[in-house]
C-alpha cells in the first residue's frame, strides 16, 4: 500500500512546502550573468526562508562560480570494485547490490555552497513562534535549506531520542523505536499513532527485514513478525544492542561489550537459533552493514572490521578513523563510513582485495548516521546527520552539498521509504516525514 501522509489530500494547507525555484538565468551562464544582472539577483525572501511566490522572478539559490573544467578523481580509477558487476547505481544496507562503474569523489572545489555567506541556522524565535524580524532576520525560518525535498508532517509522541525507524514489507504501518523504552506504531494513511509497545528497556536500534521487525534493547533482541504476530526474544547480548543487520540468512547484533552475536532462522521451529559470536572488537560495536558477501562492523574502538559471511572470520581491520565509527553504508563498489572524527571516508578494494581509503570528506562536526537514496531523477544522494542537529545532502560521487534539514536536537535515525519518502527521528523524540519533490524550472 502506498504511503500517503497527506491523508489523500496532496494540497492540504497544513503541509508546508518550501519551494526552491531557480528563476531567471542559470547562475553558471556567465554571459547572461554579465549582461542580465537584474535577472541574477538572489531572492531576499528566499534567503530568509519565507518566499511563497510561485514562480519567483529571482533566484532561489546563491550565485556561484563556474565549475572547474576537470573533476578530482582521487585515485578511484585505480581501484577494483569490491561489490560486483551490476551496472545500476545502488545502495545496500544488507545485501550488496552491485556495480562496475567507478565514481569520482571529491569534486567540491567549485565554490558552490548551499547558502553562500548567509547563516545556516534556524531562528530560535521562529521555532518558538514569535520572531518579529520577519524578512530582515538573518536566520532561517524553515526546517530545510535547498532543493528537492519538502516536509510533509511531524509525528509526535515519543519522549526521548529516536534510535530506529522501520517499514516492514507488506505492511501499511510505520514503526519507530525510542530511548523512552517504547515502540510506536503509526498508520501510514492518517499519520495517527495506532499503538504503543513497551519493550522494557531503551531501544538502541531497530530494523525490518521482510515482515520481521528486530528491536535491540539491553541484553535482548526482540523479533516480531507483522504477518503472523510471532513474538520472540533472542537472549545472549551483554549490555545494550546498538546495531542490527541481516545478511546471508543470518541476523547480526552489535553489542555494548564489543561482541557481534549471530543467529540463523530455523523454519522448522520458527525460531532464531544462536550461530556464532564474533569477538575481535575491543569496545562496543555501534554500526553494521552487509555487502559483497562481507559483514562490516564499526566500533567505539575507532576500527572497522571486515568479516567473511561464509566463514565468519575477520579478514581485515581498517584503522583510518580516529574516533567512534558511527555508521556504515555500501554504495556501488564502495564502502562509506562516518565517524565522530568529523569525516566520511570512502573505501575501495585494491588489487589484493583489501580495502583502503580513496577519498576523505571533512565536516565541521562529528557525524552520526549515513543513509542513501535516489532523487526523482534516479541520481544517488547521500544523507549524513551531524551532531550540530542537521542532516547534510550530498550528490554522489562529487560530494557537492545540495541541501540540509534541521532539527531541535541531533538526528540519530534516518530511513527511506517508497515513492521518494524518507523519515528522520531526533533527540526530542520527534519523527518527521519528508518527500522528495521535483525541482520546478523557470518558464518564460
Image: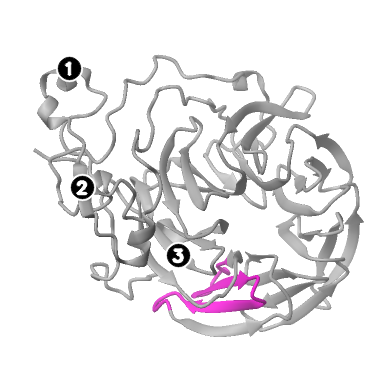
Quarter of the figure with the C terminus: top left
Q: Which residues are magenta?
A: 166-191
Residue wearing tag 3 = 432
Residue wearing tag 1 = 31
- Left or right of 148? Residue 280 is right
366 or 237, nearer to the observer = 366
Residue 115 at what x, y percent from top left? 35, 38
Residue 124 at what x, y percent from top left? 39, 58
Q: Secondary structure at mark 2?
A: helix
Mark 3 vs 2, N-terminal side: 2
- Neighbor class of circle 2 (other Cα within 10 Å; few <14, some 14-19, many 20+) is some
Q: Residue at x 40, y 48 (%)?
A: 121
Q: Is residue 294 magenta?
A: no
Q: Secondary structure at mark 1?
A: helix
Mark carried by residue 45: 2
In the image, residue 15 above or below residue 442: below
Foreground mark, 1 or 2, reads 2
Q: Residue at x 86, y 54 (%)?
A: 258
353 or 356, nearer to the observer = 356
Amino acid at each position: 500500500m502506498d504511503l500517503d501522509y497527506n491523508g489523500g489530500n496532496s494540497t492540504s494547507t497544513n503541509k508546508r512546502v518550501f519551494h526552491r525555484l531557480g528563476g531567471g538565468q542559470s547562475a553558471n551562464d556567465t554571459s547572461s550573468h554579465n549582461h542580465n544582472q537584474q535577472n541574477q539577483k538572489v531572492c531576499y525572501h528566499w534567503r530568509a526562508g519565507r518566499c511563497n511566490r510561485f514562480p519567483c522572478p529571482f533566484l532561489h539559490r546563491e550565485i556561484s562560480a563556474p565549475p572547474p573544467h576537470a573533476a578530482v578523481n582521487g585515485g578511484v580509477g585505480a581501484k577494483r570494485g569490491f561489490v560486483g558487476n551490476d551496472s545500476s547505481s545502488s545502495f545496500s544496507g544488507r545485501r550488496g547490490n552491485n556495480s562496475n562503474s567507478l565514481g569520482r569523489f571529491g569534486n567540491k572545489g567549485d565554490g558552490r555552497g548551499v547558502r553562500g555567506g548567509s547563516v545556516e541556522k534556524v531562528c530560535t524565535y521562529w521555532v518558538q513562534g514569535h520572531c518579529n524580524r520577519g524578512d530582515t532576520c538573518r536566520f532561517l525560518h524553515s526546517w530545510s535549506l535547498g532543493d528537492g525535498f519538502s516536509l510533509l508532517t511531524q509525528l509526535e509522541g515519543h519522549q526521548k531520542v529516536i534510535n530506529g525507524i522501520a517499514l516492514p514489507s507488506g505492511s501499511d504501518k510505520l514503526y519507530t523505536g525510542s530511548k523512552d523504552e517504547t515502540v510506536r506504531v503509526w498508520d501510514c494513511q492518517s499519520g495517527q499513532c495506532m499503538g504503543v509497545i513497551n519493550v522494557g528497556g531503551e531501544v538502541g536500534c531497530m530494523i525490518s527485514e521482510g515482515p520481521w521487525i528486530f528491536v535491540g534493547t539491553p541484553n535482548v533482541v526482540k523479533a516480531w513478525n507483522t504477518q503472523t504476530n510471532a513474538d520472540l526474544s533472542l537472549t545472549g547480548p551483554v549490555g545494550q544492542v546498538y546495531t542490527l543487520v541481516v545478511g546471508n540468512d543470518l541476523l547480526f547484533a552489535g553489542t555494548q561489550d564489543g561482541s557481534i552475536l549471530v543467529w540463523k532462522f530455523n523454519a522448522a521451529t520458527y525460531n532464531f537459533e544462536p550461530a556464532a559470536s564474533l569477538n575481535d572488537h575491543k569496545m562496543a560495536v555501534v554500526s553494521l552493514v552487509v555487502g559483497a558477501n562481507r559483514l562490516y562492523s564499526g566500533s567505539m574502538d575507532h576500527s572497522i572490521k571486515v568479516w567473511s559471511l561464509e566463514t565468519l572470520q575477520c579478514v581485515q581491520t581498517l584503522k583510518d578513523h580516529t574516533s567512534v565509527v558511527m555508521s556504515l553504508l555500501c554504495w556501488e563498489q564502495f564502502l562509506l563510513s562516518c565517524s565522530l572524527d568529523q569525516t566520511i571516508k570512502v573505501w575501495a578494494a585494491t588489487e589484493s582485495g583489501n580495502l583502503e581509503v580513496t577519498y576523505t570528506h571533512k565536516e565541521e562536526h562529528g557525524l552520526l548516521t549515513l543513509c542513501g537514496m535516489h532523487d526523482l531523477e534516479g541520481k544517488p544522494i547521500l544523507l549524513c546527520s551531524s551532531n550540530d542537529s542537521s542532516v547534510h545532502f550530498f550528490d554522489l560521487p562529487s560530494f557537492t552539498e545540495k541541501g540540509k534539514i534541521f532539527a531541535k536536537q541531533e538526528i540519530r535515525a534516518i530511513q527511506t521509504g517508497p515513492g521518494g519518502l524518507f523519515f528522520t527521528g531526533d533527540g526530542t523524540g520527534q519523527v518527521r516525514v519528508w518527500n522528495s519533490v521535483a525541482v520546478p524550472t523557470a518558464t518564460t
